[in-house]
Amino acid sequence: MMMFLVRPATASDLSEILHIYNQGIEDRIATLESELKDEVYMNQWFDKHQERYAVLVAEQDHQVIGWASINPYSPRSAYDGVGDLSIYIHRNHRGKGIGRQLLQKLETVGKENKFYKFVLFTFPFNNLGQGLYHRAGYREVGIFQNQGILDGAFIDVMAMEKLL
């Protein structure tokens, strides 16, 4: 069994978080983002992910091998209890249970921070991600057809949710 630690992210983790995020962008399986991110972007992103909007990392042998975050769903106060989540796993460590551990801890942190619901958006063809979310009790809300364009082609996006 793979041993790793899930803990809150710190600023010193940002270069590894950036590397894993850029893998997700390059692999075209987890985000509509197509431009690789840089340190300036990640620092600004991390500054917005404080207090309620937590960032967690999975660490093995002092290396970050995955990360997860609670992101704002909407600026409207009516949605303050709804968080949008992101999970990214280093491509050499996918399918090994890291996402499950990050998701479980993220849900605990979400409840502690007064979130009552998580939503996420995934590609309908991301079977690893969907398997993770289905096993954790997330339900499919529906498919947004032609939600974005990636590499010149329309991409559908599946919305999922879970009441915490």
Image (cartoon, grey):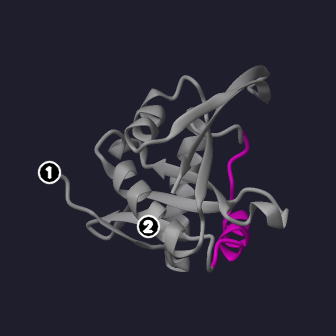
SS of the residue under disc 1:
loop
Which residue range is magenta in the image? 34-50
Up/down of 139 relative to 9, above or below = above
Name the residue beneath numbered marker 1. Answer: 1
How many other residues sit within 10 Å of disc 1, few (<14), some (14-19) or many (≥20)? few
Residue 114 picture location, percent across and down = 59, 72
* Residue at the (61%, 45%) spot, across then down: 120
The front one of 66 and 136 is: 136
How many other residues sit within 10 Å of disc 2, few (<14), some (14-19) or many (≥20)? few
Residue 7 picture location, percent across and down = 39, 73
Q: Are marks 1 and 2 in contact (CB under 8 Å)?
A: no
Indicate which label's residue lies in the foreground, 1 or 2. Answer: 2
The front one of 26 and 57 is: 57
The front one of 99 and 60 is: 99
Q: Quadrant of residue 65?
A: bottom left
Toward the right, the furthest residue is 76
Residue 48 painted magenta: yes
Amino acid type, label 2: Thr
**Mark sitting on residue 108:** 2
Left or right position of 25 against 164: right
Left or right position of 146 against 133: right
Up/down of 107 relative to 158, above or below = below
User: How far separated are the C-alphas under marks 1 and 2?
Assistant: 23 Å
* Residue at the (70%, 67%) spot, across then down: 45
- Residue 28 can be seen in this image: no
Residue 25 painted magenta: no
The front one of 114 and 10 is: 114
Of mark 1 and mark 2, the one earlier in the sequence is 1
SS of the residue under disc 2:
helix
* Residue at the (47%, 59%) spot, across then down: 67
* Residue at the (60%, 55%) spot, across then down: 117
